[in-house]
Amino acid sequence: MELVNLKDASDKASFAEAVKKGLGKNQGLFFPTNLAKFDDIDAILALPFVERSVEILTKLIGDELPKATIAGIVERAFAFPAPLTKVTDNIYSLELYHGPTLAFKDFGGRFMAQCLAEIAKGEKITILTATSGDTGAAVAHAFHGMDNIDVVILFPKGKISLLQEKLFTTLGDNIHTVAIDADFDACQQLVKSAFDDQEVRVGLHLNSANSINISRLVAQVCYYFEAVAQLSSKEREDLVISVPSGNFGNLTAGMIAKVMGLPIKHFIAATNLNDTVPRYLKTGEWAPKATIATLSNAMDVSQPNNWPRIEAIIEQGYLDKSVLSGDTIDEEYTQVAMRQLAQLGYVSEPHAAIAYKALVRQLEPGQTGIFLGTAHPAKFRETVENVLGQPISLPQALAECASKEAYSVDLPNDYAALKAHLFSLLG
């Protein structure tokens, strides 16, 4: 698998190199120089989830990793289902929250951890990442206890749910967490600054586990295939998928799946009030605004890192821009959507509700729609209970960590302070 830096075409990397580096020069994203297509998509869809995922990832990664190695990684990483649940006659929820941290990022986080352990072969590595909610827990649990790998997670202080926070701040050991007095975009910028700092990047053997890492991205392609595999042949003919979008890694993976031959007619980029992309799709003007705190906090991102990859898919001619539309769901309609889903017998949290609302708005007669359920409702227990007026029971994973002590350190939004902390911690 050859990848190229989207900011510097001379900066190329193999899959292993891109997994270890995370970002390229000038904070550029790595993207495959070629995306292959399956000749017989029906045969691929007929396979079981793990076996199919091995085929997908072998197709993407190529012969750089032996197929047997990829199979072992997938078996360890994808040890939980991604069921498609019927909500109405023609609308389904793809439930991606049946992993250990109850969020879709378990797929990418666990696959990356297994890949990195295989590629690094005992070399010392520091994972530095930022989270707007679910990435932190997925990455922390995926890497917890791994030899020679330290994980540092930055998160916006007071801007993610307490249960989300508890899932990754209570582990300790090789997992180090830092509460930054700022928003998620500021946390991401601190991570980028660290990668631009040669002293930190080389001295601490830095790597990132954000959705910018190519290993996380390719893993997410697999559950789009799993969603379509659970539909009838008739339902696959006119399929629309609505993706709750923050940093846009999830949508990027879906579009790669379509390039590989998956029969998806259209994608909806569903955002909250942080609507840089929907506005851009309508006006052609890229105009990020200050990040707004919302009920769907994991999508409180005004400058999505993965957008250049989506532009590359379109600009390189893999897909036409008409395959994608955007929609902005405000706070009032987020709550309306949660109540509408509850009336249909389906309890959901704000992110999935946004995707559902956007899907209902744009779905045409005769089409089948899927919206992505990216987190278990209990991860947003207080919000869900307030909106629906009914109690939500905690799954075991959340109940166990709710009363544990957190080990976070508070830091200001200041790169010098973060750098000093990193070297005192790991140097």
Image (cartoon, helix red, strand yellow):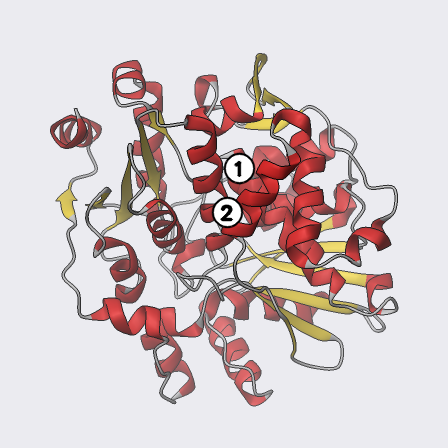
Q: Is mark 1 in CB contact (under 8 Å) with mark 2?
A: yes
Is the residue marked by circle 2 packed among few (<14), some (14-19), or many (20+) residues within 10 Å?
many
Task: Report x, y in % for residue 236.
Answer: 82, 63
Question: First in sequence: mark 1 or mark 2?
Answer: 2
Q: Residue furthest top?
A: 10
| Amino acid type for the residue under numbered disc 2 | Gly
Q: Is residue 163 visible?
A: yes
Q: Quadrant of the N terminus?
A: top right
Identify the mark at residue 91; answer none if there is no mark.
none
Task: Report x, y in % for residue 68.
Answer: 62, 38
- Residue nearer the viewer, 210 or 46: 46
Looking at the image, is 323 positioned above or below residue 31?
Answer: below
For label 1, the SS is: helix
Residue drawn at 76 percent across, 41 percent down: 259
Locate residue 311 relative to residue 298 in the image: left or right.
right
Task: Report x, y in % for residue 427.
Answer: 16, 24
Looking at the image, is 334 positioned above or below residue 138?
Answer: below
Q: Is residue 325 visible?
A: no
What residue does disc 1 label?
215
Q: Tell me the distance, in whole angstroms, between the alpha carbons under discs 1 and 2.
A: 7 Å
What residue does disc 2 label?
108
Residue drawn at 76 percent across, 48 percent down: 323
Locate residue 244 relative to residue 180 in the image: left or right.
right
Task: Report x, y in % for residue 281.
Answer: 65, 45
Looking at the image, is 297 positioned above or below residue 20?
Answer: below
Is the residue marked by circle 1 packed among few (<14), some (14-19), or many (20+) residues within 10 Å?
many
**Where, by quadrant of the figure, is residue 100 drawn?**
bottom left
